[in-house]
Image (cartoon, rainbow, N blue to C red):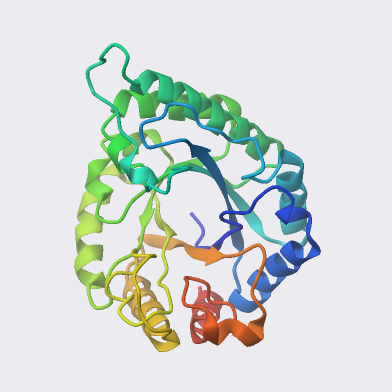
Amino acid sequence: MEYIKGFTFGWGAKRGDFTKPEAKESLQLMKERTASNYVIFALAATQETAFSTDVVYKGEHIVTDEELIDMIDYARSIDLKVMIKPTVNPADGIWRAHINFFDIDVPCEPKWRDWFKSYTEYQLHYAKIAEEKEAEMFIVGCEMVQTERRESEWRKLVKDVREAYSGLITYNTDKYQEANVAWWDEVDVISSSGYYPLGDWDNQLDRIEKIIKPFNKPFFFAEAGCPSRTGSAQVPNDWGMEGEINQEEQKAFYQDMFEKTANRDWVRGFGLWDWKAILYPESEADQDSDYAVFGKTAEKVIKDFYQTR
């Protein structure tokens, strides 16, 4: 598999956001400023709570199919390859990793079969678009930690997606969870979220390599990144951590991650987190403490690394 020099784009984009000229300008800047060759369109469906079974992927909270298709066409026009990543989060703010139901059905309680039916419908909707637009890869889920033990349901979901989409399929497990997925043989590519602490990358890469080696499949980090805050390099997954704005800490995280993964030829790239559809003014980059790298010192580190791959 070719090396993926990617960025996640448009997470949290709402209806109409992709129609704004700023969105295409942002995608163009992403390519120019980071030397990315892949864009991952991450879609943000919702469900009412972590215990709800209805996945809602149409409404004001998400871009329309027409918007997505137009943005894919634009990505192609500027020589970007495409992944589609339909993701879901509870609307009450609970992280999707906590979506969970009883393993033994109980009358009057929400059930796994109902949730997977709705979630599969959601995945198939975008798998058809991925097939129509010839996306290079489709990501069937992201950090769905509590769901991962439902092996038979996930295997069926992947098989169902294959009926609609002929490209490469991956699943993006969460950090530290690479051994939690017993059904890696069902997908074409193994991926996880690379939010590992500064200074701990060698340990984590040693661990991951042992887990994935028996499957003999390509691997990449479908997410990886760090906020530009003091302390975030030690807990890069904590988006709510409070701290002073610190671009140098974000830069150090990226330098460490790239240095350590460059020595592992089985790591076949990144889908970095994240690049917004609507950017802040570059003059205000020093006021942003989130994962964004636009106009920050980490941006050049990424470009320099991607240009060497």
In the displayed structure, does residue 198 sit left or right of residue 85? left
Report the front residue among 255 and 66: 66
67 in relation to 132, above or below: below
Query: Which residue is at a point 19% across and 68% down the rendered structure image?
Result: 203
In the displayed structure, does residue 65 sit left or right of residue 297? right
Q: Please say whether residue 67 is visible from this viewpoint.
A: yes
Report the front residue among 307 and 96: 96
| Position in image of residue 60 (x %, y %) | 67, 43
Which residue lies most toward the top here?
A: 107
Report the front residue among 82 and 298: 298
Report the front residue among 162 and 147: 147
In the displayed structure, does residue 150 sit left or right of residue 298? left
Query: Which residue is at a point 52% across and 72% down the rendered structure image?
Result: 292
In the displayed structure, does residue 58 sit left or right of residue 206? right
| Position in image of residue 19 (x %, y %) | 78, 54
Query: Which residue is at a point 37% across and 37% down the rendered structure image?
Result: 50
Query: Which residue is at a point 47% across and 43% down the rendered structure image?
Result: 91
Labels in figure, total:
0
167 in relation to 225, above or below: above
169 in relation to 196, above or below: above
Snapshot quadrant of residue 69: top right
| Position in image of residue 48 (x %, y %) | 46, 35
| Position in image of residue 166 (x %, y %) | 58, 34
Q: Please say whether residue 162 is visible from this viewpoint.
A: no
Snapshot quadrant of residue 199: bottom left
